[in-house]
């Protein structure tokens, strides 16, 4: 199953449009379930929808995002998310960047 995740940093009018745009893109890329939130991306700690999204996904699923910075704002958070999902057999792809973890293998 393709699962989408969309995020903006705040709830002002321009960010709302950005969130809606991300959701439309994720739908066009075949996401059956989309988690969306308006929350700062500086840390994954306060991102309830991200946590629900990651818990929802199962082996064989694919997490689809529009851009990497919607998922993680630090390299450490990104590494942790990719590593954890890879161990669970879940791939990540970005619609606007050449990112697809189906070709990455972690053996640690």
Image: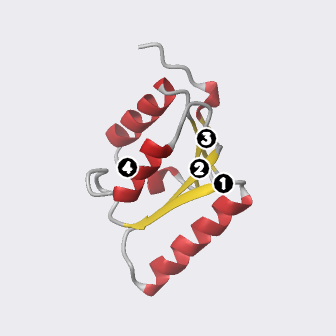
Residue 91 horizontal side relative to residue 7, left or right: right
Q: Secondary structure at mark 3?
A: strand
x%, y% of residue 24?
66, 68
Q: Secondary structure at mark 2?
A: strand
User: Which residue is denoted by mark 2 in the rendering?
Assistant: 3
x%, y% of residue 42?
30, 56
Q: Are discs 2 and 1 less than 8 Å apart at CB?
A: yes
Figure quadrant of residue 55: top left
Could you give the CA–CA distance between mark 1 and mark 4, rounded to whole angstroms?
17 Å
Where 108 sits versus 41, above or below?
above
User: Which residue is denoted by mark 3 in the rendering?
Assistant: 62
x%, y% of residue 54?
44, 44
Instruction: Say which of 75 and 15 sits in front.
Output: 15
Other residues around mark 3 within 10 Å, as few (<14) / some (14–19) / many (≥20): many
Q: Secondary structure at mark 4?
A: helix
Q: Are discs 4 and 3 less than 8 Å apart at CB?
A: no
Q: Secondary structure at mark 1?
A: loop
Could you give the CA–CA distance between mark 3 and mark 2, rounded to whole angstroms?
6 Å
Q: Are discs 2 and 4 less than 8 Å apart at CB?
A: no
Other residues around mark 1 within 10 Å, as few (<14) / some (14–19) / many (≥20): many
Other residues around mark 2 within 10 Å, as few (<14) / some (14–19) / many (≥20): many
User: Which residue is denoted by mark 4 in the rendering?
Assistant: 51
Q: Which mark is residue 31?
A: 1
Could you give the CA–CA distance between mark 4 and mark 3, rounded to whole angstroms?
15 Å
Residue 11 horizontal side relative to residue 14, left or right: left
Other residues around mark 4 within 10 Å, as few (<14) / some (14–19) / many (≥20): few
């Amino acid at each position: 199953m393709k699962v989408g995740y969309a995020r903006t940093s705040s709830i002002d009018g321009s960010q709302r449009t950005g969130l809606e745009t991300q959701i439309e893109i994720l739908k066009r890329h075949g996401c059956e379930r989309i988690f969306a939130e308006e929350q700062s991306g500086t840390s994954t700690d306060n991102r309830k929808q991200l946590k629900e999204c990651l818990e929802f996904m199962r082996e064989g699923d694919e997490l689809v995002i529009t851009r990497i910075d919607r998922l993680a704002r630090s390299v450490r958070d990104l590494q942790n998310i990719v590593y954890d999902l890879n161990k669970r057999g879940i791939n990540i792809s970005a619609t606007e960047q050449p990112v697809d973890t189906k070709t990455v293998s972690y053996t640690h």
